[in-house]
């Protein structure tokens, strides 16, 4: 007999030995079963319990002694069919969650770095936030107080685009930022602008979203470095969240 067929059906080596021995012995106690199957006495009871759970064995009690017997071999077909149904159902459930699993793997596995130069380059790096979907957010840490007027105009247009897309933003400005600029940013729906915690100022700004961090400086050279890596993003997100808890809202 090809025992591999029974293994493929889901039976272990021990279960196969005990089941075949039961078929040959008929009603039997564990003593003859151990001798016939070659399975150790210490595990034969465990194997019998598993066979009973699978519907492939049963027992009767005579004079306070258990006698075990194999189920009709046709039960093997029933067991295999039931196992196939369980596997088919499991496959369907996996298919349901597969897109989410693949998206998580894609985010985790995707790593890249880019460098942008000039104010236009910094804007291009920022516009990676266009990948965000409605209800998602991006985060800025360390926005400099001094920026060219054209940059303020750009930000106002960008906020309008952000609002239309249903995206939110949380922004931490350096503490020397003009209150009028803070008022302006907070006037846009979905933008929460605050001051960095006391004693903390950074010449670089950090944009954090999805799986991306953009580090940019505007003086003396305008440059932005975009890093796409989930672990790095999560690290900077933790820094931002900590600063946010200690941030200061604009006094009205």
Image (tube, rainbow, N blue to C red):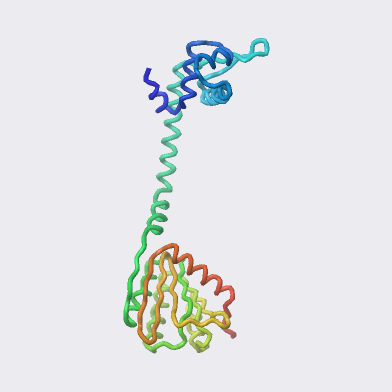
The answer to which of 98 and 218 lies nearer the viewer is 218
Residue sitting at x 45%, y 30% = 83
Q: Is residue 10 above or below residue 68?
A: below
Q: Is residue 27 above or below residue 228?
A: above
Residue sitting at x 43%, y 65% = 210
Residue sitting at x 46%, y 16% = 20
The answer to which of 55 and 62 lies nearer the viewer is 62
The answer to which of 102 and 153 lies nearer the viewer is 102
Q: Is residue 224 left or right of residue 231?
A: left
Residue 248 picture quarter: bottom right
The answer to which of 162 and 224 lies nearer the viewer is 224
Residue 80 picture quarter: top left
Q: Is residue 47 left or right of residue 209?
A: right
Q: From the image, which quarter does the N terminus lie in?
A: top left
Q: Position of residue 22 (x, y in %)?
A: 51, 15
Q: Position of residue 169 (x, y in %)?
A: 47, 73
Q: How many marks are shown on the rendered structure?
A: 0
Q: From the image, which quarter does the C terminus lie in?
A: bottom right
Q: Position of residue 142 (x, y in %)?
A: 48, 79
Residue 164 picture quarter: bottom left
Q: Position of residue 216 (x, y in %)?
A: 40, 78
Q: Is residue 221 above or below residue 207?
A: below
């Amino acid at each position: 007999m090809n025992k591999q067929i029974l293994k493929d059906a889901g039976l272990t080596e021990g279960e196969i030995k005990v089941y075949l021995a039961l078929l040959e012995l008929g009603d039997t106690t564990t003593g003859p079963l151990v001798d016939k199957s070659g399975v150790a006495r210490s595990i034969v009871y465990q194997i019998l319990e598993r066979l009973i759970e699978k519907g492939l064995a049963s027992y009767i009690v005579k004079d306070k002694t258990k006698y075990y017997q194999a189920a009709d071999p046709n039960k093997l077909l029933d067991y295999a069919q039931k196992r196939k149904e369980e596997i088919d159902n499991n496959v369907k459930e996996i298919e349901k969650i597969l897109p989410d699993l693949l998206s998580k793997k894609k985010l985790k596995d995707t790593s890249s770095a880019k460098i942008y130069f000039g104010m236009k380059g910094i804007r291009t790096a920022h516009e990676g936030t266009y990948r965000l979907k409605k209800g998602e957010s991006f985060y800025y840490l360390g926005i400099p107080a001094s920026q060219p007027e054209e940059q303020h105009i750009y930000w106002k247009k960008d906020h309008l685009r952000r609002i239309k897309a249903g995206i939110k933003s949380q922004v931490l400005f350096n503490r020397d930022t003009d209150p009028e600029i803070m008022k302006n940013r907070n006037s846009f729906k979905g933008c929460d602008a605050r001051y960095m915690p006391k004693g903390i100022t950074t010449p670089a700004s950090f944009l954090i979203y999805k799986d991306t961090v953009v580090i940019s400086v505007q003086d003396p050279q305008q440059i932005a470095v975009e890093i796409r890596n989930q672990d790095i993003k999560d690290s900077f997100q933790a820094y931002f969240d900590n600063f946010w808890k200690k941030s200061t809202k604009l006094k009205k």
